[in-house]
C-alpha cells in the first residue's frame, strides 16, 4: 500500500517581483528565489511550490488575489496551458523592455567585455499571425488539464480522445489539442481542425508515441508572403491498407483547401518526427514555396530553414547588412564569409555589395536550396559548401578561398565551437557581424573574440512576440 503523499506547501499573499528567464517571473522567499510562470510583476498571488532545490524553487499560481497594473488580457483561449506564448499577459511594450534588458544582462554578466550603448530593440511588425511555419503533433489520447479531469461531463473512459496540438512543455508524449492558434494565419486552424474531424470520421488511428503505432502522426504548415501554402503530413503505416486511407485524407484536404499549393506526405517509421533523412512524396502542386525579400526570391522546401517571422527577418537581415557595410566605400566590394548560411538568405541578401560571398552550412539540402536561390536571382558571385563547420572552416580552407574582409555568422543556439572562433581569429577579418538567437552563448563568444575585436554596435531584434526569445546582432571591429 502506497504512503499518502504530503501536500505541496502553499505560500500566500506573494507579490511577484520581476521577470526572469524562460518566460517566468520570480519572487524571493526567505533564502530562496522562486520562479513562477504565467504571471507578471505586481501580481499578488498564492503559489504552490512544486519543486524545491537548495537555492531556488519552482511554483505555480493557484489563486490571484490582485492583478498587476502592468498586465494585458491574453487573447488566446489556450493561454496558461499551451505554454507557447508565455508573455501574452504582458503588454508588448513591456515585453520589449524585458528583452532589451535580457540582452544587456547577458552580454554584460557573461561576456564581461566593453560595450557601447545599445540600440533600442526593434519590435516586430506583427504581434499576431507572424509565423510562417508551425508544427503540430497527433496523438491517440490527448493530455487533460486537472480541471478537465474533474469535469464530470467528460467521458474519460471512452478512449475516444484523439487530438492534434502542441506538446506540453517537458513531455514528449503529451499533446494538448489546439482549437485556434494565433501564431499563424487562421487558414491553418481551419485546415488542421478539418484534418482532425475527417480523420476521425473515416476511422483513421492517431499516433501513439510510446507504442509507436497509429497512422496520423504530425502536421507541418508553411506559408509565405507570396500567398503560397505548404502542408506536410507525416503518417505511420501499420498495415498496407493504411496508405490508401492516408491518400483519402490527402485528397479530401486538397479538395477542401485549394489554397494549398504544396501538399506533401511521408511515411515515417522512425522513433522521432525528423524528416531530414526521409524521402517525401508530393501529392499536389510543387514541393516548395517562394518567399520574397526586396527584389530577391527565395525557394523554401519542407526541409529548408527560413526565419519563421518573414517581415521581421527582413529587418534582422537589414541590420546585418548595414553593420557589414556601413562606413565602407561603395566600390569596396569585400570578400565575405557567411557562416551557418542556411538556405543562403543572408549570403544572397548581401552578395550584390560583395566581390564574393562564401556560405557554409551543415545541412546539405539547405546548401542546395542556397545554390538554387542564387540561380533564380541571377547572383553569380556566391559559393556554398556543406558540412561540419569545424571541419570545413579551417586555416587551409581560408588559404584556398581567400582571407575574408567580413565574416557574418549566425550560429545555432549553442553558439560557435571554440575551434571555429580560433579560425576566425586567425583569418583576422576587419569586421564580424554576429547574429544570434541566444545572447547568452553570443556573450560567451564575444569574450573569446575580445582580445582582437571590440564591440562597436549592439542591436536587439524581436522576432517572436509573446515569447521570451530574442535575436541580437553585434558588430565587431578589429582592434588596432
Image (cartoon, rainbow, N blue to C red):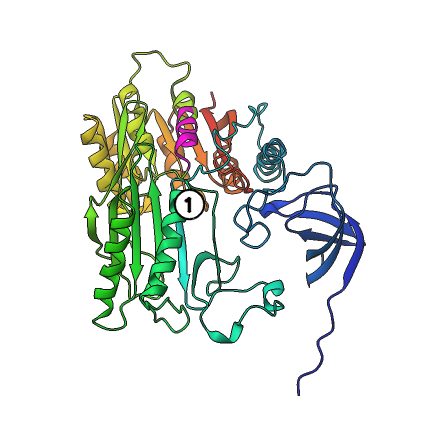
The residue positioned 47% from the left and 48% from the top of the image is 180
Residue 420 visible somewhere in the drawing? yes
Residue 186: name its quadrant: top left
Between residues 83 and 348, which one lies in front from this camera angle?
A: 83
160 sits left or right of 301 in the view: right
Image location (x, y in percent) of residue 299 = 25, 37
Between residues 33 and 292, which one lies in front from this camera angle?
A: 292
Seen in the picture, residue 235 relative to 440 is either above or below; the reply is below
Seen in the picture, residue 112 relative to 171 is either above or below; the reply is above
Which residue position is annotated with label 1?
Answer: 417
Prevailing secondary structure class for the magenta stretch in the rendered image: helix
**Magenta span includes 240:** no
Say which quadrant the N terminus sits in.
Answer: bottom right
Image location (x, y in percent) of residue 459 = 51, 27
Residue 53 visible somewhere in the drawing? no
Image location (x, y in percent) of residue 280 = 22, 54
Between residues 319 and 42, which one lies in front from this camera angle?
A: 42
Q: Which residues are magenta?
A: 309-318
What SS does tag 1 mark?
loop
Amino acid at each position: 500500500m502506497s504512503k499518502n503523499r504530503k501536500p505541496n506547501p502553499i505560500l500566500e499573499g506573494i507579490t511577484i517581483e520581476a521577470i526572469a528567464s524562460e518566460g517566468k517571473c520570480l519572487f524571493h522567499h526567505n533564502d530562496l528565489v522562486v520562479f513562477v510562470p504565467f504571471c507578471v510583476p505586481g501580481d499578488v498571488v498564492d503559489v504552490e511550490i512544486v519543486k524545491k532545490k537548495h537555492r531556488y524553487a519552482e511554483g505555480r499560481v493557484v489563486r490571484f488575489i490582485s492583478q498587476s497594473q502592468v498586465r494585458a488580457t491574453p487573447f488566446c483561449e489556450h493561454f496558461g496551458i499551451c505554454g507557447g506564448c508565455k508573455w501574452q499577459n504582458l503588454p508588448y511594450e513591456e515585453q520589449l523592455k524585458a528583452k532589451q534588458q535580457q540582452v544587456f544582462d547577458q552580454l554584460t554578466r557573461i561576456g564581461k567585455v566593453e560595450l557601447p550603448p545599445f540600440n533600442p530593440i526593434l519590435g516586430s511588425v506583427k504581434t499576431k499571425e507572424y509565423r510562417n511555419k508551425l508544427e503540430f503533433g497527433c496523438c491517440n489520447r490527448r493530455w487533460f488539464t486537472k480541471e478537465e479531469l474533474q469535469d464530470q461531463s467528460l467521458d474519460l473512459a471512452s478512449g475516444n480522445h484523439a487530438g492534434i496540438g502542441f506538446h506540453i512543455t517537458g513531455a514528449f508524449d503529451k499533446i494538448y489539442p489546439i482549437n485556434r492558434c494565433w501564431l499563424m494565419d487562421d487558414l491553418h486552424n481551419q485546415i488542421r481542425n478539418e484534418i482532425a474531424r475527417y480523420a476521425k470520421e473515416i476511422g483513421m488511428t492517431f499516433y501513439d508515441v510510446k507504442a509507436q503505432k497509429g497512422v496520423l502522426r504530425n502536421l507541418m504548415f508553411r506559408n509565405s508572403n507570396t500567398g503560397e501554402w505548404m502542408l506536410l503530413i507525416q503518417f505511420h503505416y501499420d498495415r498496407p491498407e493504411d496508405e490508401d486511407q492516408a491518400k483519402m485524407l490527402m485528397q479530401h484536404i486538397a479538395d477542401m483547401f485549394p489554397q494549398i499549393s504544396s501538399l506533401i506526405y511521408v511515411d515515417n517509421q522512425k522513433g522521432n518526427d525528423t524528416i531530414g533523412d526521409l524521402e517525401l512524396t508530393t501529392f499536389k502542386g510543387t514541393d516548395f514555396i517562394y518567399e520574397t525579400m526586396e527584389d530577391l526570391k527565395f525557394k523554401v522546401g519542407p526541409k529548408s530553414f527560413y526565419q519563421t517571422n518573414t517581415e521581421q527577418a527582413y529587418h534582422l537581415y537589414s541590420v546585418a547588412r548595414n553593420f557589414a557595410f556601413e562606413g565602407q566605400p561603395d566600390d569596396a566590394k569585400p570578400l565575405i564569409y557567411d557562416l551557418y548560411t542556411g538556405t543562403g538568405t543572408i549570403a544572397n541578401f548581401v552578395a550584390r555589395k560583395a566581390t564574393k560571398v562564401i556560405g557554409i552550412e551543415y545541412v546539405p539540402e539547405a546548401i542546395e536550396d542556397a545554390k538554387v536561390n542564387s540561380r533564380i536571382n541571377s547572383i553569380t558571385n556566391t559559393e556554398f559548401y556543406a558540412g561540419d563547420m569545424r571541419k570545413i572552416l579551417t586555416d587551409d580552407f581560408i588559404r584556398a578561398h581567400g582571407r575574408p574582409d567580413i565574416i557574418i555568422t549566425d550560429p545555432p543556439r549553442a553558439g560557435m565551437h571554440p575551434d571555429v572562433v580560433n579560425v576566425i581569429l586567425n583569418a583576422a577579418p576587419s569586421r564580424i557581424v554576429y547574429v544570434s538567437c541566444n545572447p547568452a552563448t553570443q556573450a560567451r563568444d564575444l569574450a573569446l573574440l575580445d582580445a582582437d575585436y571590440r564591440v562597436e554596435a549592439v542591436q536587439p531584434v524581436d522576432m517572436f512576440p509573446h515569447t521570451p526569445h530574442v535575436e541580437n546582432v553585434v558588430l565587431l571591429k578589429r582592434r588596432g
